[in-house]
Image: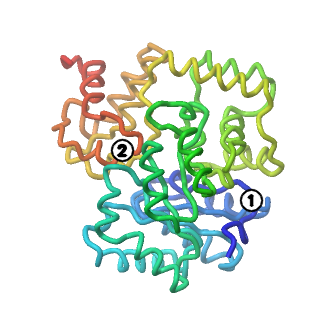
Amino acid sequence: MSIFQNVKKNFGFGCMRLPMKDGNVDTAEFSEMIDEYIAAGFNYFDTAHGYLSGMSEKALRTCLVDRYPRDSYILTDKLSSQYFNKANDIRPFFEEQLRILGVDYFDFYLMHAQGRGNYEKYKSCHAYEQAFELKSEGKIRHVGISFHDTADLLDTILSEYPDIEVVQLQVNYIDYNDAAVQSEKCLEVCKKHEKPVIVMEPVKGGNLVNLPADADAVLRALGGGSNASYAIRFAAGCDGVFMVLSGMSNISQMRDNLSYMKDFVPLNDTECEAVARVTEIFASMRLIPCTSCRYCTEGCPKKISIPDLFSCMNTKHIYKDWNADYYYSVHTKNAGKASDCIKCGKCERICPQHLKIRDLLVKVAAEFEKVEA
């Protein structure tokens, strides 16, 4: 079966960030977004059990699965390392995901966030072998991985498990040549192994939408689309990419994304030069490259809202005003402060960006709490 069979166009609905209301997914708005997305000719949905603390899978059941025929959409879910400790945990967890979503199979099932911190666990628990077995049973159509590490490890994984069919990578114009993320090098490895690529984080957790003023001015000077449009079109235009995911949080973001992905056109030379200039501006500011995935917050024993505190730090560096200090107090009023960190390292072990979170929290505390770094 072709991996592209039944996949319509090259733009996927990432369900890690959804419209929220009173702490829950706004199912009315989410349903409306799904309706417009499908009406525009798209059909690919991506989730994971931990997204929105379990609410993503449930909202997809309510807003997609219960409202559309199963053969009208493509559904991707993932096996995340925090939900199994031994081989016998995997199949029951998988069956629970099917039950929550109300489906009999997943079109794509990915080994989640593969990297040096967890790959050996997946191997020792025979996670890949079990996924391939579930495929043989018809409960998975295609087995793949999502990946956050260096190109040499990706090459190792694809060599050790050549039956992997697809790789999900973080690709955006900021990370493309970044020495840590290595997007371009990872794309080259996928090309070497003839694996199609799904792109995640094309707007880097919103960082390439809400740009610093001087970077924003570069893109505005083009006189064309939104900041998101340049980021998503950049990713979609990379060689080997067959799908770009966008985590859309409201209907206006959905409509903006659809406006340029319905009839996709890659960036032209002038637009490429502009995003290169934006990349240079970001590099000069030395911002914390957090994408606000929030994986780090679930296991934090001090309940520190790490992504929000990093956002305050970045805002302080960009605008140098009182606003960041105010929001720092908002985000720590009923949660831990940066100085409360006990340096257990749980956050760093799960961080897809491999940030030195403990060291960064020391700097955040020095900035906002006047704690000596």
Q: Is residue 352 above or below residue 42?
A: above
Quadrant of the image for the N terminus?
bottom right
Secondary element at tag 2:
loop
Q: Determine which residue is flagged by label 2.
A: 351
Amino acid bearing label 2: Cys
Amino acid bearing label 1: Glu
| Residue 36 numbered mark, or none | 1
Q: Is residue 93 above or below residue 30?
A: below
| Residue at screen point 34% across, 61% down | 81
| Residue 23 numbered mark, or none | none
Q: Is 239 or 315 nearer to us in this picture? A: 239
| Residue at screen point 32% across, 55% down | 118
Horizontal arrangement in the rendering, residue 19 relative to residue 34 (left or right): left
Q: State the image coordinates of residue 198 (x, y, percent, origin top left).
A: 60, 54
Q: Residues within 10 Å of mark 2 (few under 14, many from 20)?
A: many
| Residue at screen point 24% across, 47% down | 346
Q: Is residue 198 above or below residue 236?
A: below
Residue at the extreme bottom: 137
Q: State the image coordinates of residue 154 (x, y, percent, origin top left).
A: 46, 50
Secondary element at tag 1:
helix
